[in-house]
Every structure is written in C-alpha cells, then in structure tokens.
Image (cartoon, rainbow, N blue to C red):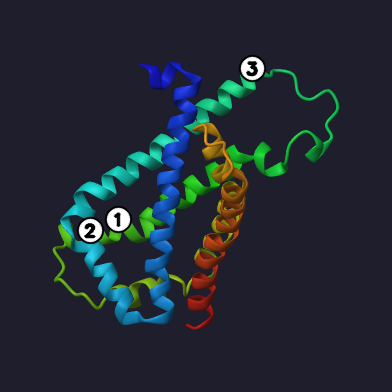
C-alpha cells in the first residue's frame, strides 16, 4: 500500500490528519469556553453533541481514525528518520541544529496520546456507559456539573494543564510544518506561519484557562 511504502504519502497523511485535528481542537475549545461564560449554553451544546446521530456515529469515528492515523504516521516517520541518520550530529549545538520542540515532537506526541487516552477514560467512556450500558435518563442539564466536578481533583487538573503546554509546543512546530508538507508555499506563507504560531499559543492557553478557572472556583 502506498500509504505505508511512500514517504511522501505518509507525510501528507500525517499533515492532513493533523490539520483535521486542529479544526476539531478549535471547535472543542469553543464548546468548552461556554462552561466559563454560560453553563446553560454549555449544557445545550454538550447535549447536542452527545445525542446527535451524525456527531455520534459519523464524526466521532472519523475523529478517532484521524487521531490514530496522525500518531501512527508520526511514529513511522520518526523511525524512518532515525534509520536514515544513524549517527548523531558530530557536534551537538542545540538550537543551531534544530529546535528542542522539533527534536522532541515524538515525545510531546506520546504525552498527548497518553492524555487523550486518559481524557477518553474520564469523559468519553463514562458518557457511553451512561447512555448505552446503564441506560441513564436523558438529562440535558447534567453536563456542566459533571465537567466542573472533574476539575476538583488537583492531580487531574495539573495533568490537563501539562498536556496542553506540551500540545502548544507540538503545535508550534507541527502546525506550520503541515502546510509545508502538502506543498503550500506562496505569498501567503509568511502570514500563515504567523497564524499557526498564534494558534499554537492561544488555543492551548484557552484550555488551560478553563481548567484553572474551574479548579479555582470549586
């Protein structure tokens, strides 16, 4: 299969799946932000996302596939790069050779993947169990209290903040690189790079703010 034998195909697949996840991340931030400004709106949006058939049975599987594709391609490409350069830099000069972020994309990726697994365990699986195992009654007002309650735990909140710090670092290098990998190189490239850096800072900070806000307002 070309996807697994062609380096270009792997890079394009990782880039496109990464861009898809970036869009999802922004949408997720908008919904989560409502928990700070309007609990009623947060409940309404969460209830829609949790009961809409298109979201549940089409978008969620696509999202899971996108996550798996992105990380699988990342691990394969990292392994390929290590094999292609078996000897380390003759003289390591830190950021003169490459930035710490770019050298440790696989590390930040692993931490983010672990966070996603924990996040699924914390939020997604209990929701599935509530609706399809215990057959809990439909309650469009329960989402805010359940979400805020999660952030009462300082360990969970600290882990959440740490994960989004690393996500910001991952995005700092990966978001702009994604466009380079798919051949986007024109007069708008400089402006686009500025936007990707802005996104890599503002979006993770938004999630961190939400977590700390709920933790401090218990």
Of labels 2 and 3, the one closer to you: 3
Give the secondary structure at mark 1: helix
Kindly identify which residue carries mark 2.
129
Residue 56: quarter of image: bottom left
Q: Residue 125 has which mark?
A: 1
Of labels 1 and 3, the one closer to you: 3
Residue 104: quarter of image: top right
Q: Check whether the beta carbons of the residues at disc 2 and disc 1 lie within 8 A of each other.
A: yes
Viewer-proximal residue among 80 and 184: 184
Quarter of the picture containing the N terminus is: top left
Q: Is residue 17 above or below residue 92?
A: below
* Residue 130 visible (yes or no): no
User: Which residue appears farthest toward the front when viewing the image?
Assistant: 187
- Which label's residue is closer to the chain start, 2 or 3? 3
Structural distance between the alpha carbons of marks 1 and 3: 40 Å
Mark 3 crowdedness (10 Å alpha carbons): few <14, some 14-19, many ≥20: few
Q: Position of residue 161 (x, y in %)?
A: 56, 63
Structural distance between the alpha carbons of marks 2 and 1: 6 Å
Give the secondary structure at mark 2: helix
Kindly identify which residue carries mark 3.
84
Q: Is residue 31 above or below residue 120?
A: below
Could you tell me which residue is drawn at 84 percent across and 35 percent down?
Answer: 93
Q: Position of residue 24 (x, y in %)?
A: 39, 53
Q: Position of residue 114 (x, y in %)?
A: 48, 47
Give the secondary structure at mark 3: helix
Q: Is residue 36 above or below residue 117?
A: below
């Amino acid at each position: 299969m070309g996807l697994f034998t062609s380096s270009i195909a792997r890079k394009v697949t990782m880039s496109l799946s990464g861009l898809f996840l970036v869009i999802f991340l922004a949408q997720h931030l908008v919904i989560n932000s409502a928990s700070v400004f309007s609990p009623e709106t947060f409940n309404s949006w969460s209830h829609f996302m949790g009961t809409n058939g298109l979201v549940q049975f089409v978008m969620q599987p696509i999202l899971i596939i996108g996550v798996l594709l992105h990380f699988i391609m990342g691990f394969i490409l990292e392994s390929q790069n290590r094999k292609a350069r078996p000897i380390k830099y003759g003289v390591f000069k830190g950021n003169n050779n490459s930035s710490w972020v770019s050298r440790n994309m696989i590390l930040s990726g692993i931490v983010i993947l672990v966070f996603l697994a924990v996040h699924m365990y914390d939020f997604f699986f209990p929701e599935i169990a509530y609706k399809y195992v215990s057959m809990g009654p439909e309650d469009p007002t329960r989402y805010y209290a359940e979400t805020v309650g999660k952030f009462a735990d300082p360990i969970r909140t600290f882990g959440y903040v740490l994960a989004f710090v690393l996500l910001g670092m991952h995005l700092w290098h990966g978001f702009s690189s994604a466009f380079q990998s798919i051949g986007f190189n024109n007069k708008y490239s400089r402006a686009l790079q500025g936007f990707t850096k802005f996104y890599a800072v503002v979006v993770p900070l938004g999630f961190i703010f939400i977590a700390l806000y709920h933790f401090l307002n218990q």
